[in-house]
Amino acid sequence: MTDENGGIVVEGVARSFGSVQAVNDVDFKAPPGEVTALIGPNGSGKTTLLLILASLLAPDKGTVRVAGFDPVAQPGEVRRRMGWMPDTLGVWDSLTASEVLKTMGALYGLGEADRSSRAEDLLGTVNLTEYAKQPARVLSRGQQQRLSLARALIHDPEVLLLDEPASGLDPGSRVELRSLLRSLAAAGKTVVVSSHVLSELDEIADRAVFVSRGRSVKSQTLDEAGSQTRRYYVRAEPMSELATALQSYGVRFETRGDSRREEFLIQLGSTAEASWLLRTLVLGDVVITAFAPAGGALEETYMSLDTDRR
Ligand SMILES: Nc1ncnc2c1ncn2[C@@H]1O[C@H](COP(=O)(O)OP(=O)(O)OP(=O)(O)O)[C@@H](O)[C@H]1O
């Protein structure tokens, strides 16, 4: 799926604000046709990096290519091909939701008929048709997030940069966001999503780039994340029988929880190993009441990395 001229390529990028080194040394690739997650704790440099990709901030050093163009030297080429959803929607006070989209369409050079039909379609896509004539400023936080997403899509960009797109969305809207992003990737778009809500990224992303203190510390595909060692929690009735069984199979465990809801945490190398253990326990007459991964695949990687907040 990689395309020499498409997607995003970032090499050795750094940017500081006075004495704060917001982005220190970041390398990553986001190929077309895939959703790439940018993951890191608060203050790790995700927004700064997205602003650089969106041509809104110049890096102090390093090279960046967005859809084959350099955001510093060719910002116009980048902006034509890139849709940007910031972490909060800045709205023009007097415009309705529909006018926000049409105005943005006009700024991107769409003709009047095109921008009206595109605005109407996109309001439908993000379930805001009934709010088309409402001033954008009165929309709820989640509705504004959806309008912001529609605004990023108005010119049918080939690259999408989304900063915390799920923040403020209710569970139903999150599911819809997930399926929209998957369908954009399936249509060949390059999608980059920043977030620290890891559970939803497992379902959205094809690959992840982990950032810590302004550095890209790891990059992995979801397949790689899913096949690594993973923690599972197990509960049984009584727990003492589970303990005896695990000891007899040589499986080490940690006890978690309290006497009301005690569970064992175990580490297994693969889903095949997890299936084997579950089957063996059940066939051995241990009454298993819960057996599940302790966290998502990306969360496992995140927890294993030396990432810290600032
Ligand atoms: N304009 C600025 N002036 C000074 N410092 C800044 C500026 N923008 C960002 N920073 C600092 O750079 C670091 C990275 O910030 P950034 O917003 O990129 O992090 P983030 O990963 O997006 O965080 P979050 O997950 O909390 O949104 C932080 O320490 C922040 O305080």
Image (cartoon, helix red, strand yellow):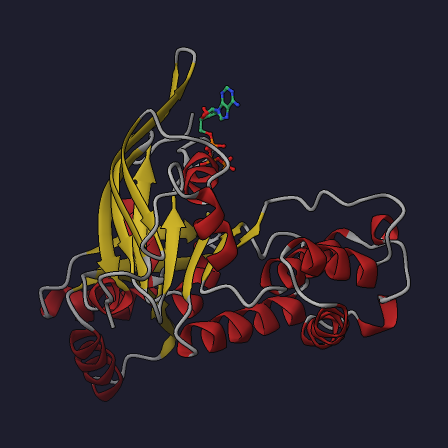
Looking at the image, which residue sits at the far top?
19
Image quarter where the C terminus lies is top left
Q: Nearer the viewer, residue 167 or 50?
A: 50
- The percent coordinates of residue 113 (x first, y second) are 76, 74
> Is residue 82 in view?
no
Residue for point 38% across, 47% down: 39
Residue for point 74% across, 76% down: 117
Is residue 133 placed above or below 257 in the rendered structure?
A: below
Q: Nearer the viewer, residue 139 or 278?
A: 139
Residue for point 15% across, 66% down: 269
Q: Nearer the viewer, residue 173 or 151?
A: 151
Number of callouts: 0
Tell me if 98 is positioned left or right of 225 in this view: right
- The percent coordinates of residue 175 (x first, y second) are 58, 72
- The percent coordinates of residue 121 (x first, y second) are 71, 77
Image quarter where the N terminus lies is bottom left
Tell me if 146 is positioned left or right of 30 in this view: right
Residue 225 in which image quadrant: bottom left
> Is residue 174 in view?
yes
Tell me if 171 is positioned left or right of 196 in this view: right
Residue for point 72% across, 42% down: 90
Tell me if 262 is positioned left or right of 176 in this view: left
Residue 241 in which image quadrant: bottom left
- The percent coordinates of residue 52 (x first, y second) are 42, 38
Is residue 149 placed above or below 137 in the rendered structure?
A: below
